[in-house]
Image (cartoon, rainbow, N blue to C red):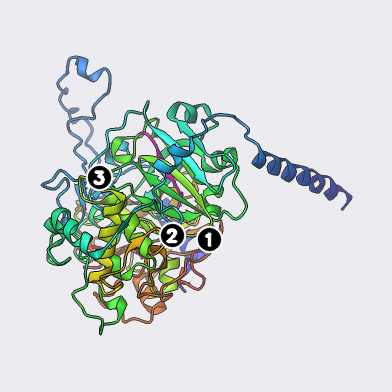
Amino acid sequence: MGMLRVPVFVSVIWFGGVCALAQSPTYGVGRTPSPEELRAWDISIGPTGQELPPGRGTTKDGAQIYRAKCAGCHGATGMGGSAPLLKSKAGPDVELWERGRILPLRSPYAVLVWDYINRAMPLNREGTLTADEVYALTAFLLNINGVIAEDEVMDAQTLPKVKMPIGDKYAALPDWKPRTPRLKGYPY
Amino acid sequence: MGSKRPARRDFLKSGAALAGGFTLGAAAPALGQAPPPQAPMIKGDKDQIPYGDRSKFVNSVRIAHGGRPSPDAFGLYFHIASPLQDSVGVITPSSLHFVGTTRGAYIPQIDPKEHRLLIHGLVERPLTFTMEDLKRLPSVTRLHFIECAGNRTSRRAKTVQESHGMTSCAEWTGVPLSLLLKECGVKSGAAWVVAEGSEEVKGASSFPLAKAMDDSFVAYGMNGEDLRPQQGFPLRLMVPGFEGIFHTKYLRRIKVTDRYYMNYNDFGHLDQDPKIAALEYQIGPKSVITFPSGGQQLPGKGFYEISGLAWSGGGAIRKVEVSTDGGKRWNLAEIKATPARMAHTRFGYKWNWDGQETELLSRCTDELGQQQPSRADVAKYWNKPLDASFNVPGLDNTIQPWKIASDGSVTNGNA
């Protein structure tokens, strides 16, 4: 048993080494980006909306932009176009999960609608919308799905506070651990 | 767990049968028969010096997956399936590797000299790396499969390319993500990362920091050369064993966050049932016989080596079993090389076909002891009737049956 002590002692030192590595760079390769660069690159908007840029928009503004830039593919009313539905064909009497995979309806966070439009729309002209336009389109899409009222202004403060109809009725993701089966009890 | 474990005695018996000698279906060439005529000799072609072509007699090709044209009328690529029926060994040639896209995609033509990878968020020191920077850092080279979550068998699939062609395996070279994250110094409270590509939709996927620190890496090399544009040139993320969509192409940014950021690709994973959500990260144990497979034709009874591929997101393949009688008996297959973790593993099984109608199946077990289920096992788990319309929730890793008719034709046993 005395033999065992040596490797245990060594491993403590080794873990200590890893901790030290985590605190300071080992290789010194790479460049520090400027704060402006970080702001320009960071288009990932999290659930709290902390990354949202300044700007504002309303359903009324959004309806106009939608007609000009979105309706061609998504249809005049968010339905009937060649691109994915933006409004459910089923009414609020139908259970939410049965109303289709409609982003501005089913999303757990209103900010995801903003992120999605800003990142990936319109097709072939991605990244051309201004922040105001994205806020306005987000307001319009939330409004036609009955999520917000027509007079609500969407900006970096109001958008993260919008209560989405899904509430917490969706599955949380499981913790992932290395070398672990993905689902206990599944027939393997 | 299946009850039909291969009995060692059965296995030995079949081995003895092999040792006892087969009656070969194909006749040996008669002595004295003339050798094949001399093939025409082709002069050296200067176009074949820089980058060689394969033989004009080899015509194994990829196909648009799921009946959707690729490219479409707008020039957008959609899913492209790999010809597994022709595959040998475990490496998919880069030109035949499957291609998945999030919503149809153009290929960004990225000048690697201009490309940057930014790592930021909950880190002490955000850093930007050029491709040159990344190639200076210590690298790893690993075999890994990538499989699209849409890779599911169906009644309509005629060939293994249609039923399973959205998986491929290559040798990937790059820098461990853990190394890059340590270089930036991960702050306490960090729990997730968001990875983003530079294609038009800036597709972004979120996954647990534990996976990022475990075995993920940013790859610039594939099968001994630079990544192909369809595979994310100049840089892609490898998240071994996770669904294909996490292997972000044209990787330009990694953001460390305190929580799950549901971004572009993640909305597709939103689900009502926590069990289905749990099945949508790590790919389960899966195998398929690639020869003989749907659409192929056996010339007659006699000896054939059954050949196939097995893989799992849970780690290395430990065991593959083959049934040549529709699942009544399972026999240990031979694993062809040391199985790598989260990589295609080639297996073979010596089979003497008696010319009778039958069904061939394979199933695998990975290092975690997870065994590939049948459709019946999965239907039972979900308490659903097993009929042709039963849709396997999450990624479909069920056993694929191939029917052998007495005329030697091979068809999909799920049809």
Q: Give the range drawn in magenta.
A: B234-242
Gap between marks 2 and 1, in whole Å? Answer: 9 Å
Q: Which of marks 3 and 1 is nearer the N terminus?
A: 3
Residue underneath mark 2:
B281
Q: Position of residue B314 (x, y in %)?
A: 49, 57
Q: Where is residue B113 in the image (x, y as percent from the top left)?
A: 37, 25
Query: Relative to residue B225, is residue A71 drawn left or right?
Result: left
Q: Check residue A176 in the rendering and tell me which mark sits there, or answer none.
A: 1
Question: What's the residue type where badge 3 is placed?
Answer: Thr
Q: Position of residue A155 (x, y in %)?
A: 36, 59
> Are discs 2 and 1 less than 8 Å apart at CB?
yes
Helix, strand or loop at label 2? It is loop
- Residue at screen point 15% across, 25% down: B37
Q: Check residue B222 in the rendering and tell me which mark sits there, or answer none.
A: none
**Please, which residue is most extreme toward the bottom here?**
A93
Query: Relative to residue A5, is residue B408 drawn left or right?
Result: left
Given residues A83 and B314, the one toward you in this image is A83
Residue underneath mark 3:
A128
